[in-house]
Image: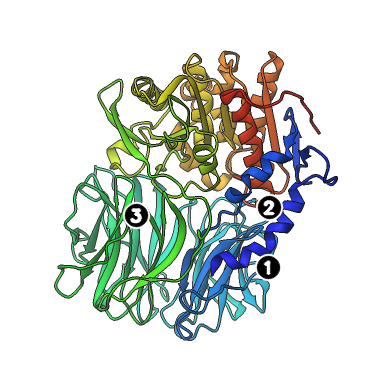
Amino acid sequence: MIRGWFLAGLAALAASLLPHDARAASVEAPASLIVSGVPPVPAALLEQAKPYLEYRSARLLGWHPVRRSVLIGARDDSRQLYEVAAPGADPRQLTFGEEPVIGGEFSPVSGDVMLALADRQGDENYQIFRVEDGRMISLTGEEGRNLGVRWTRDGARIGYSTTRRTGLDTDLHIMDPRDPATDRLVMEGRGGGWSFADFSADGTRALLYNYISVTISRLFEIDLETRALRALVPPTAEPFAFGSARYGPGGRILAITDFGAEHRYLAEIDRATGLPRRLNAETDWSVEDFRIDPHGRFLAYVLNENGVSRLRLLDLPTGRPRAAPPLPGGIITGLSVAPWGEVGFSLATASSPGDVWSFDPDGPGLTRWTQSGAGLPAGVEPEIVAVKSFDGLPVSGLLYRPDPARFPGPRPLVMVFHGGPEGQSRPGFLGPANHSVNELGIALFFPNVRGSTGYGKTFVALDNGPLRREDAVRDVGAFLKRLRRDPGIDPSRMAVSGASYGGYMTLASLIRYPKDFRAGVSTVGISDFVTFLEGTGEYRRDLRRLEYGDERDPAERRKLKAISPLTRANRIRAPVLVVTGANDPRVPPAEADRIVTALRARGGTAWHVVAEDEGHGFEKKPNADYQFLVTVLFWQRYLLGTAPHALSSR
């Protein structure tokens, strides 16, 4: 089982974090971390937290077309690729690098080639690798950002996107991964949003996707020989976007879109008119993914219903719904249909981490391939908290409460913001964060403020630009009003936390609501919108300008400066823990340095943890585990009042 492959590494993990002297009282930080202003982490805290640090999950990446095994991504010290030969079999490790592998796939038909995708120390300049006997052989060299691998149906070639020509524009290439010398340019793109969506059955045409923003994207078809390109859906006055797109039986073009609708739906694109025709009946929630049976019998799709994934089947010949097995509420990822028609996916719920499941649409029941959560502490099911904000807008979030039998009376609470802002807090497994609920008795609340995905294209655009940015922060006030009245919450002990855009929301909330929040944790967060936009990766800068504003415009620049946390850092009275990846290509590390310097300059408390071998968040297990322990210590001191106060730094 999955659990078996990581137990052997637990002793090594503990050794890497425990003191060199077994009698010492504190845990040493990994050598890659620079830690300042942080007290020693008690060794006893590591002992208590060990079961939560064992957390693993398995994500389905695909099927082997001949062996009928599954390829999964799972983490040891870093995320790697494994093959599971049969349901319940021990995973066989396929990659062994120090850097996390973010994706992988076997070639269709023969399965003779396996590809992997990885970067260096979190720089997000991903390269495509061919995996042979555990060795990773780069097919794309060392330059640019190479993503979006799609195989042709016969498994002879791949298409992918790359920025290596200019560092800004995304070009489209095709190659036979067995021979990198076959690599050829198909299209020079302008901007950073181009990718392959699918290849036609005969390999002569391809669907192309151009992402402009979360609410605007376009779908094209290209003739791979003539390179003639045509837009499939004409632009309209009302913005619209696409999700996945694929060729269906008989060359039909199927896609996810919100053309003419608030929520995304499954559609067939009429080749003559370019108009999408709805295929699924649901209208109140968005379709987020779909896959087509290779034999054209059905398609499987996933509906996002207030954050919960619902798996549905649609009969392609008739257009009617088919029966799908019932699943517990959670998050489905890695949806895949095997060449023989078996439907596979990963499912994570609040009470269990992600595992791989499958079913035969014509057969009985579900098959479970992995057991990631066996013996690990379970999580608790959240409740939905819905309120109306300052302008009457309905907003909601997920509240995880500690066991009242173990932790009676009003409990402290941490409000945790998601990143994005085009993201959504959903009821998946909390991993190590379950320690806060189960062992510290801290309630966790995950708000979905305006600008979040999952609630329609109007909602996701309500925070766009500098003039509306702080409306999302005002949503926090509506949640505070509701939570203060909750008899299970202690209003005098509340804190905030978040990563990326959530890091900005953390700092902004500490500024706007200084009497409500006692402490905050900002991970790879934005502190100054102007310097962020000037320093973020060139390939994504225009995309972020559409979301936040254009720092080149004098009026917008002034407003962006005015709403930046760094401009108002003197209003932050609470202690702050700041976490930084030194190689972060999205939020420059200087964003963290500036806010730490500003807070300390006026005598404020700022703990700072910097990883020299990480990017936009900590992916390597020793780093992530130490960050977790420091965060627990931070909450113990500033939210619970139970930690010692001796300081150290290095």
> Quick one: which residue is furthest to the front in this view?
405
Which residue, given by chain and number where applicable, does mark 1 sit on? 96
Observer-nearest residue: 54 or 324? 54
Which residue, given by chain and number where applicable, does mark 3 sit on? 218
Which residue, given by chain and number where applicable, does mark 2 sit on? 121
As shown in the figure, which amino acid type bears the numbered disc 1? Phe
Observer-nearest residue: 27 or 578? 27
Measure the C-alpha gap from mark 2 to mark 3: 32 Å
Q: In this view, does 166 lie above or below 138?
A: above
Query: SS for tag 2?
Result: loop
Label 1 environment density (alpha carbons within 10 Å; few <14, some 14–19, many ≥20): some
Labels 3 and 1: the sequence-earlier one:
1
As shown in the figure, which amino acid type bears the numbered disc 2? Gln
Label 3 environment density (alpha carbons within 10 Å; few <14, some 14–19, many ≥20): many
Looking at the rendering, in which quadrant would you find the C terminus?
A: top right
Q: Which residue is drawn at 54% across and 29% down?
A: 529
